Image: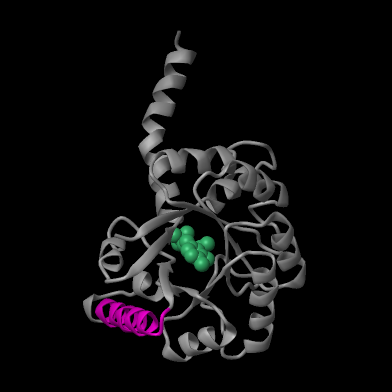
Amino acid sequence: MPELGVNIDHVATLRQARMGNFPDPVSAALLCEKAGADSIVAHLREDRRHIQDADIRLLRKHVKTRLNLEMSISPEIVNFACKVKPDQSTLVPERRMELTTEGGLDVAKGLKRVSKSILKLRKAGIPSSLFIDPDRRQIDASIKAGAEIIELHTGRYADAKGTIRKERAFKEILLAANYARQKGLIVNAGHGLDYDNADKIAKIEGVNELNIGYAIICKALYAGLYKAVKEMVRLVKR
Ligand code: PXP
């Protein structure tokens, strides 16, 4: 059975909309753990659009399961990670204008820089996972770079329209997962997974962990909204 990592960036996105203290991603992380999450994922982006440095420090202090720091390979962020020491780092590509991480890390192209970052993080005691497209070339490059863990990008599968396209995208993930496992890598998966499509990925043999954020936070909004309004109605009309 795969584990579940819950990405709490979207809680910080809401907080940053008012630049205040609420909702607090750390409290959200603790609630996710209480509900059975096996790890907490947070992405410290170079532009600090949602998660802030202080959040990571607090998460490091309070997360009881595992803290998985999603991050670019920029030296500033790698240095920060080495100081804070999350349980794991997940290296992702980052572009300023993107809405979210839009593709896998091109490890084949950036082999030298990726290897250097993995080595630096390993020296600080932090294992690295590489977020890559489900593609043999990227898997081979990840091994060359010294990674022991990969996270297969499930975005194309999640976004695929129509049964044929969806099935084709699923097959890519299935083949990539099998290939990577045969090569001895730990295989995680994530991006765009939701309450309808996660199940199929979770059933792939040997998939170690699914990392899911957006769908969970969206669901939480509806699941909790009724109670929140009811309580305010009671307060206002008392
Ligand atoms: N894994 C990685 C590497 C990601 O970049 C993200 C998005 O931050 C996720 C998983 C979670 O994706 P989503 O929020 O679409 O569930």
Query: Hey, which quadrant is residue 147 in on the image?
Result: bottom right
Query: Hey, which quadrant is residue 203 in on the image?
Result: bottom left
Q: Is residue 147 left or right of residue 203?
A: right
Give the image location of residue 149, x and y in percent. Answer: 48, 73
**Magenta segment includes 12:** no
Q: Is residue 206 above or below residue 108?
A: above
Magenta stretch: helix, strand or loop mostly? helix
Q: Is residue 96 visible?
A: no
Q: Residue at x 27, y 59 (%)?
A: 196
Q: Is residue 156 above or below residue 215?
A: below
**Magenta segment includes 171:** yes
Q: Is residue 172 left or right of residue 53?
A: left
Magenta residue span? 165-184
Give the image location of residue 137, x and y in percent. Answer: 47, 91
Of the pair 93 and 123, the residue shown nearer to us: 123
Give the image location of residue 87, x and y in percent. Answer: 57, 57
Q: Is residue 122 left or right of residue 203?
A: right
Q: Residue furthest left?
A: 163
Q: Is residue 100 visible?
A: yes
Of the pair 236 and 97, the residue shown nearer to us: 97
Q: Is residue 150 left or right of residue 194?
A: right
Give the image location of residue 183, x and y in percent. Answer: 40, 85
Of the pair 238 and 61, the residue shown nearer to us: 61
Location of the N terminus by quadrant is bottom left
Q: How is the image coloured?
A: one colour
Location of the C terminus by quadrant is top left
Tag count = 0
Q: Residue furthest top?
A: 238
Q: Residue at x 64, y 73 (%)?
A: 95
